[in-house]
Image (spheres, rainbow, N blue to C red):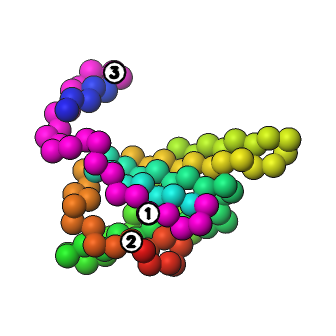
Amino acid sequence: MKLGDYQTRKEYNFNIKDTSYVKTYKDGDTTVEISPLGVSISAKEKSAGMSLVVYTDKGKKELINTKKDIGTNAHESSEAYKGKSKSYQYILKFKNLLDISKIEKIEFNGKSQ
């Protein structure tokens, strides 16, 4: 897989076994999808604070904690209809690829899954 940075004109090569592979976790109206490239969180409404921790055989890694300013360089979008929230999305791209095959469980907003 190749990615290009048009501003610096640099090209980056990645060796990803399967780019379509995603781990999906659901909690009510919230869906967390983790891929080697990033995280997508879809919900009905924006949460006041958000945290996401992944657990692997090497321990835990905090990917998002909006109260501690971790993972807050994400893209956020929302959709409303007649003043009521229809959907909210939070997309965080990783700086380094994450081997999601090593994820044993996640903790989203304090709940283990």
Camera-side residue: 52 or 30?
30
Q: Which residue occupies 20% across, 75% down? A: 58
Residue underneath mark 2: 106
Estimate the x, y position of residue 35 in percent, counting from the top left.
Answer: 33, 51
Residue 6: numbered disc: 3
Q: Which residue occupies 70% across, 41% down? A: 79
Q: Quadrant of residue 12?
A: top left
Are dots 1 and 2 in contact, CB under 8 Å? Answer: yes
- Tell me which amino acid carries mark 1: Tyr
Mark 1, secondary structure of its residue: strand
Q: Earlier in the sequence, mark 1 or mark 2?
A: 1
* Residue 57 falls inside the magenta stretch: no
Q: Residues within 10 Å of mark 2 (few under 14, many from 20)?
A: many
Residue 51 appears anywhere in the view: no
Q: Earlier in the sequence, mark 2 or mark 3?
A: 3
- Left or right: 13, with 92 as reference point: left
Mark 3 and mark 1: Cα distance apart in space: 34 Å
Q: Which residue occupies 47% across, 58% down? A: 32
Mark 1 and mark 2: Cα distance apart in space: 8 Å
| Numbered label tally | 3
Instruction: Give the magenta-colored segment's residue range.
Output: 6-29
Residue underneath mark 1: 25
Q: Which residue occupies 66% across, 44% down? A: 78
Estimate the x, y position of residue 93 in percent, counting from the top left.
Answer: 39, 46
Q: Quadrant of residue 60?
A: bottom left
- Tell me which amino acid carries mark 3: Tyr
Task: Check the picture and name the quadrant holding the C terminus.
Answer: bottom left
